[in-house]
Image (cartoon, helix red, strand yellow):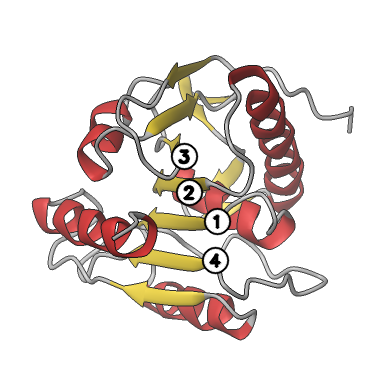
Amino acid sequence: MPAPDPTFAHEFVPATAPGDGLTLLLLHGTGGDEHDLVSLGKELLPGAALLSPRGRVLENGMPRFFRRFAEGVFDVEDLKFRTHELNDFVRAAIEQYGVRKNKIVAVGYSNGANIAAGLLLLHPHLLSGAVLFRAMVPFTPDVGPDLRRIPVFLGPGRRDPIVPRPDTERLPQMLESFGAEVEVHWHAGGHELGQDDLIAARTWLARKFVPA
């Protein structure tokens, strides 16, 4: 494979309120773009800086962050390559926008949540936390990352037709085995986001990252 290209179409929204210098890395689902989760980010952590890239892979014209062979069957080699590529982009954005290192929390939905989980596994020092809505286990790493002191919020759906229940239950177990502090909020519905997801994630973010 070629070397990762750190260039992504993206939107950056500077922080609008004083705080602890947190930036939300917003990662959309299949068919989304760099604008999709901006309003969500503003709702989850008002005043935080927002960095929202568009996935560079197209599936039937729909942007994604990595390829898959079928629904729920990932092209793991491409996923790993694209994860390294996304890491390079975020590190370039840190320099370009003056984003504080170690103050980046990923917020991903579906495909975006899966590549955010990939960042935790391959580049554990990039993120200070993650909110993963409807995520799956992206892959099993060859070497377990050190995720101690990294809080992770997982938002699975009880009736999600896309994410298998065993996979949903295996992800927190994997992350906890690497030391992550995991909190799980079960949405009563399916793959779509509900208002309860947003309330639970907003409360969690405020508790974990907003100074008292």
Q: Can you identify the residue that label 2 sits on?
A: 105
Q: Provide the secondary structure element on which disc 4 rests.
A: loop
Crowding at mark 2 (Cα within 10 Å: few <14, some 14-19, many 20+): many
Residue 137: which disc? 4
* Pointer 3 with pointer 1, Cβ within 8 A: no
Q: Is residue 24 above or below residue 202?
A: above
Left or right? Give the position of 26 relative to 86: left
Q: Provide the secondary structure element on which disc 1 rests.
A: loop
* Pointer 3 with pointer 2, Cβ within 8 A: no
Badge 2 or badge 4: first in the primary sequence? 2
Look at label 2 and name its amino acid.
Answer: Val
Crowding at mark 3 (Cα within 10 Å: few <14, some 14-19, many 20+): some
Q: Can you identify the residue that label 3 sits on?
A: 21
Q: Residue at x 73, y 70 (%)?
A: 145
Measured as percent of width and height from the top left, residue 38 is found at 31, 27
* Near-viewer residue (74 or 16): 16
* Near-viewer residue (100 or 70): 100
Position of the N terminus, as image quadrant, is top right
Residue 128: which disc? 1
Q: Residue at x 47, y 43 (%)?
A: 112
Measured as percent of width and height from the top left, residue 175 is found at 56, 75
Look at label 1 and name its amino acid.
Answer: Ser
Tell me the quarter of the picture where residue 211 sits.
bottom left
Crowding at mark 1 (Cα within 10 Å: few <14, some 14-19, many 20+): many
Left or right? Give the position of 195 relative to 147: left
- Furthest-right residue in view? 2
Q: Provide the secondary structure element on which disc 3 rests.
A: loop
Marks 2/4: CA–CA distance:
19 Å
